Image: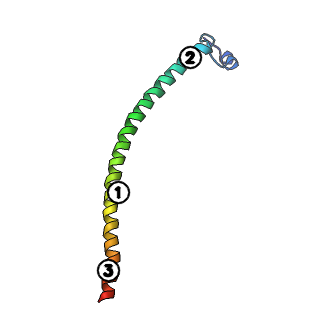
Amino acid sequence: MIHHHSLTEKGMPRYISPFRFYSVVDRLIHQYFNWIGDQVVSRGLKYTQIREKEKEKKDGNEAKLHRFHALHLHSYPERRKKK
């Protein structure tokens, strides 16, 4: 059993070498982040594809709206002037 003061002095239990401990943790962290990276990338690709489709739809609608407004805004005063 390790006494409390020996832990705080060394900062770590004596029986695990810090280097081995860190290398194991490091590898786990790398694997974890690689996995997360893959998840994020695949999700991100799906997300951007969806966003692009939505944007195309939105741009199309906006273009229609702009044309509609342009027609009505420009033609309406002219019609009123002619009368």
Residue drawn at x 62%, y 13% as measured from the top left? 2
Q: Nearer the viewer, mark 2 or mark 1?
A: 1
Residue designated by label 2: 23
What is the spatial separation of the Cα atoms under label 3 and label 2, in whole angstroms? 75 Å
Q: Amino acid at mark 2?
A: Ser
In depth, the one of 38 and 78 nearer the eye is 78
Mark 1 lies on a secondary structure that is helix
Instruction: Specify few, some or many for label 3: CA neighbours under 10 Å numbering under 14, 14-19, or 20 or more.
Output: few
Looking at the image, how many numbered discs can be counted on the residues? 3
Residues under numbered marks 3 and 2 in contact, where contact means CB atoms less than 8 Å apart = no
Instruction: Tell which circle, 3 or 1, labels the residue nearer the N-terminal end.
Output: 1
Q: Amino acid at mark 3?
A: Tyr
Q: Position of residue 68 (x, y in %)?
A: 30, 69
Instruction: Specify few, some or many for label 1: CA neighbours under 10 Å numbering under 14, 14-19, or 20 or more.
Output: few
Q: Position of residue 55 (x, y in %)?
A: 35, 52
Above or below — where is 15 with respect to 70?
A: above
Residue designated by label 3: 76
Q: Residue furthest right?
A: 9
Residue drawn at x 61%, y 14% as measured from the top left? 19
Q: How is the image coloured?
A: rainbow
Instruction: Tell which circle, 3 or 2, labels the residue nearer the N-terminal end.
Output: 2
Residues under numbered marks 3 and 1 in contact, where contact means CB atoms less than 8 Å apart = no
Residue drawn at x 42%, y 35% as measured from the top left? 40
Number of the label disc, if any, that sits on residue 16: none
In depth, the one of 48 and 11 nearer the eye is 48
Number of the label disc, if any, that sits on residue 59: 1
Q: Amino acid at mark 1?
A: Asp
Q: Position of residue 11 (x, y in %)?
A: 66, 20
